[in-house]
């Protein structure tokens, strides 16, 4: 769609590329579409060049073909997390009871709502800002969003009855957070990035809890770093789960599915 005012797109693309934006052409088109005045475009461009995530400027992110609202400070959905959604859909039967932990914006919750036909669908996050954002994204869906630490806020009646637990929990080792791109480490909530000394602190807790909350035959599905697979598989096995590794080289994504026998 053409912008409602004259613009110099080549100059905008050049400015974005000079600032390090890899997909400068695509970003220029999105900024042009988002701005309704030259002043608004100038403001958005300046903020982007300064390193603010594009998704915060637009107010949304594309995920699994869906437009997901993203508020400032909330974890931005990554394209690689589509592997988690695909793996979850493959192992889950009809009319499942589903929980999305560390839900962030609720992107995975919404994607699963469209792929599955859950008899019960819920999400949870410890960050109040993420919970507020997720609640906006699930409007119109039959889903509940809880604030709290992992399984703690969930209704007790679902303990041992869940068919699917998914979690895009933080898995960046604490010392590696400082090495992340500025867009992430300076703008996203640290609680959504820092996974503890080896990056697996939260994921181990997810696995331990899932062993109690899953129904027999139910699955846990998580995203993890490729170099962390062996350690996390060992942890899940100790919790009584049977893990399987999924890797997508094109998206540089790794997911684990873990079944409760």
Image (cartoon, rainbow, N blue to C red):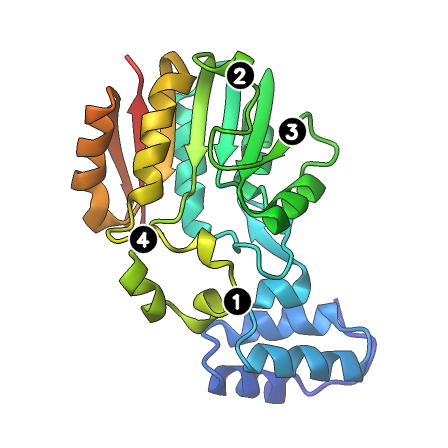
Comparing 93 with 127, the one in front is 127
Residue positioned 68% across, 87% down in the render: 8
Q: Residues within 10 Å of mark 4 (few under 14, many from 20)?
A: few
* Pointer 1 or 2: first along the chain: 2
Q: Which mark is residue 187?
A: 1
Q: Quadrant of residue 217?
A: top left
- Considering only vertical position in the picture, is 206 above or below 159? below
In the picture of the structure, the residue carrying the numbered disc 4 is: 252
Q: Residues within 10 Å of mark 2 (few under 14, many from 20)?
A: few
Disc 3 to disc 1, C-alpha distance: 27 Å
Q: Which mark is residue 144?
A: 3
* Pointer 4 or 1: first along the chain: 1
Residue contact between numbered discs 3 and 1, judged by CB atoms under 8 Å: no
* Pointer 2 or 3: first along the chain: 3
Disc 1 to disc 2, C-alpha distance: 35 Å
- Considering only vertical position in the picture, is 59 above or below 212? below
Mark closer to the observer (4, 1): 1
- Considering only vertical position in the picture, is 78 above or below 22? above
Kind of element beneath mark 2? helix
Residue positioned 57% across, 20% down in the render: 155
Q: Is residue 155 visible?
A: yes
């Amino acid at each position: 769609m053409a912008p409602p005012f004259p613009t110099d797109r080549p100059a905008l693309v050049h400015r974005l590329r000079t600032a390090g934006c890899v997909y400068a052409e695509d970003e220029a088109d999105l900024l042009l579409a988002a701005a309704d005045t030259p002043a608004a475009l100038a403001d958005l461009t300046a903020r982007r060049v300064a390193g603010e995530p594009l998704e915060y400027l637009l107010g949304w992110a594309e995920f699994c073909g869906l437009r997901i609202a993203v508020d400032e400070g909330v974890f931005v959905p990554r394209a690689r997390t589509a592997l988690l959604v695909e793996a979850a859909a493959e192992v889950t039967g009809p009319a499942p009871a589903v929980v999305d932990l560390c839900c962030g914006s609720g992107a995975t919750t919404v994607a699963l709502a469209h792929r599955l036909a859950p008899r019960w669908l819920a999400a949870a996050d410890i960050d109040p800002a993420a919970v507020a954002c997720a609640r906006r994204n699930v409007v119109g869906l039959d889903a509940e969003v809880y604030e709290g630490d992992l399984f703690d806020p969930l209704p007790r009646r679902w303990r041992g009855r869940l068919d699917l637990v998914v979690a895009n929990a933080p898995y960046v080792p604490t010392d590696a957070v400082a090495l992340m791109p500025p867009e992430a480490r300076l703008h996203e909530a640290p609680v959504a990035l820092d996974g503890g000394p080896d990056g697996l602190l939260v994921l181990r807790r997810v696995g331990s809890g899932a062993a109690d909350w899953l129904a027999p035959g139910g699955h846990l599905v998580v995203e993890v770093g490729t170099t962390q697979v062996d350690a996390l598989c060992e942890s899940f096995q100790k919790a009584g789960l049977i893990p399987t590794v999924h890797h997508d080289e094109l998206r540089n994504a790794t997911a684990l599915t873990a079944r409760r026998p």
